[in-house]
Amino acid sequence: MLLTPGVLLRLGPNSQVRMVSPNLTDTRVEVLRGTAMVEATDLHKENNIRVLDHGVTTILVKNGLYDFDADNPEFVSTTAKSSSKATTRR
């Protein structure tokens, strides 16, 4: 799934995501089930791409690969830089 030009979201088998905000300057997705990988090759400072996984919001700030696993709440980044913060659900 193309999130923004140069930023792809790839899903693993039996995975599910929810598009929270589809705007080019405020793109947010939530990983609900399974695994997801974001491949950012052309990230700009104007982009505000966020991935929510188990109450933690990860903001993509640098090109690279970002791995998410909804079944195992951990974030793995290879050659990438991000900022994460915990959020509370109501």
Image (tube, rainbow, N blue to C red):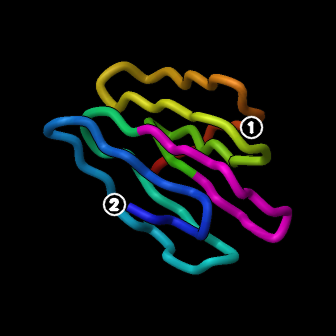
- Disc 2 target residue: 18
Q: Residue at x 47, y 48 (%)?
A: 89
Q: Residue at x 56, y 22 (%)?
A: 76
Q: Nearer the viewer, residue 60 or 7?
A: 7
8 left or right, relative to 17:
right
Q: Residue at x 55, y 25 (%)?
A: 75
Q: Nearer the viewer, residue 20 or 45?
A: 45
Q: Indicate the position of residue 56 as horizontal and vertical percent values.
A: 57, 38
Relative vertical location of residue 44 with respect to residue 9 in this rendering, above or below: below
What amino acid is at disc 1?
A: Ser
Q: Residue at x 66, y 50 (%)?
A: 41
Task: Give yes or no for contact between labels 1 and 2 (Cβ–Cβ under 8 Å).
Answer: no
Confirm whether the magenta stretch covers residue 44.
yes
Q: Nearer the viewer, residue 38 or 27?
A: 38
C-alpha gap between disc 1 and disc 2:
20 Å
* Residue farthest right in this picture: 45
Magenta stretch bounds: 37-50
Q: Residues within 10 Å of mark 2 (few under 14, many from 20)?
A: few
Relative vertical location of residue 55 with respect to residue 25 in this rendering, above or below: above
Locate residue 88: give its quadrant. top right
What amino acid is at disc 2?
A: Arg
The mark nearer the N terminus, 1 or 2, is 2
Q: Indicate the position of residue 53 as horizontal and vertical percent values.
A: 46, 39
- SS at circle 1: strand
Q: Residues within 10 Å of mark 1 (few under 14, many from 20)?
A: some
* Residue farthest left in this picture: 14
69 left or right, relative to 81:
left
- Disc 1 target residue: 82
Q: Indicate the position of residue 21 as horizontal and vertical percent values.
A: 50, 73
Q: Which mark is residue 71?
A: none
